[in-house]
Image: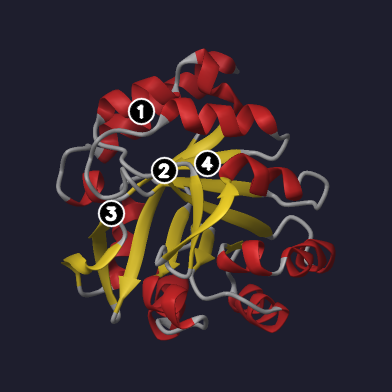
Amino acid sequence: MILFPAIDLKDGQCVRLKLGDMDQATVFNDNPAAQAKAFEDQGFEYLHVVDLNGAFAGESVNGAAVEAILGATKNPVQLGGGIRTLAHIESWLAKGITRVILGTVAVRDPELVREACRQFPGKVAVGIDAKGGHVAVEGWAETSELTAVDLAKRFEDAGVSAIIYTDIDRDGVLKGLNIPSTLELAAAVSIPVIASGGLASIEDIKRLLQPDCAILEGAISGRALYDGRLDPAEAMALIRAARETKA
């Protein structure tokens, strides 16, 4: 299992939103690059970055902050938020992003996702953000008729490298991950699934290391890491021990 620490960018700063509301943003660090290096120093092996302004604008807004992050860490970085064209994808991959996350465009233009997977194999993930079980788009400002499972199945044969599944109703409020819905999605498709939204404590990590969660690629943690509810050393020690046991 991979534990992805999250850096959500709003106006060039590291923030966490409550329930996806841009007006309920808490600033945790005004230096995203330093935060990325801190996560690397804490033993994390991968980084999850979202351009929140970009998700609403439909284009990269915090590009300078993302580039600073890339310069500050050796860890692979996956990036989402405002990536809506093949040119956007190509540009970010050329700058060193390991994997792009396509969200709104996966609903609006699924053929673009398929083409991106063909052109950039292994480099494209799909972000599925759900509110009440239905997919939200445009920075979570709009809810579609699609269910998360329906959307995921559209890309079953497309070559998508992962699905990042976020339960918006839990995001930023430390209620714990929605394990049942995440496992339901993971069981419905062969694409690896990453859990997101609500990870609150070491108990969530222990739950993710149970046998039924072995089908998940990993999980994303944000607020719990920033406010100290989740100790990085303890979390990574549990994950390493679980890997060693499997080996």
User: Rounded to the nearest whole Å, what is the CA distance between mark 1 and mark 2?
Assistant: 24 Å
User: Rounded to the nearest whole Å, what is the CA distance between mark 3 and mark 2?
Assistant: 12 Å
Tag shown at residue 19: 3
Instruction: Read off the residue under disc 4.
Output: 194
Task: State the residue in front, 61 or 241.
Answer: 61
User: Rounded to the nearest whole Å, what is the CA distance between mark 2 and mark 4?
Assistant: 18 Å
User: Rounded to the nearest whole Å, what is the CA distance between mark 4 and mark 3?
Assistant: 19 Å
Name the secondary structure under disc 1.
helix
Where is residue 189 shown, x and y percent of the image?
70, 35
Decide: is 88 above or below 73. Answer: below
Task: State the residue in front, 144 or 96.
Answer: 144
User: Rounded to the nearest whole Å, what is the CA distance between mark 3 and mark 1?
Assistant: 21 Å
Instruction: Read off the residue under disc 2.
Output: 132
Task: State the residue in front, 60 or 178.
Answer: 178
Tag shown at residue 205: 1
Tag shown at residue 33: none
* Residue shown at 35% from the left, 62% from the top: 7
Amino acid identity at mark 1: Ile
Decide: is 152 above or below 177. Answer: below
Mark toward the viewer: 2 or 4: 2
Amino acid identity at mark 3: Leu
Where is residue 200 shown, x and y percent of the image?
25, 36
N-terminal label among 3 and 1? 3
Mark toward the viewer: 3 or 2: 2
Q: Is residue 218 left or right of residue 202?
A: right
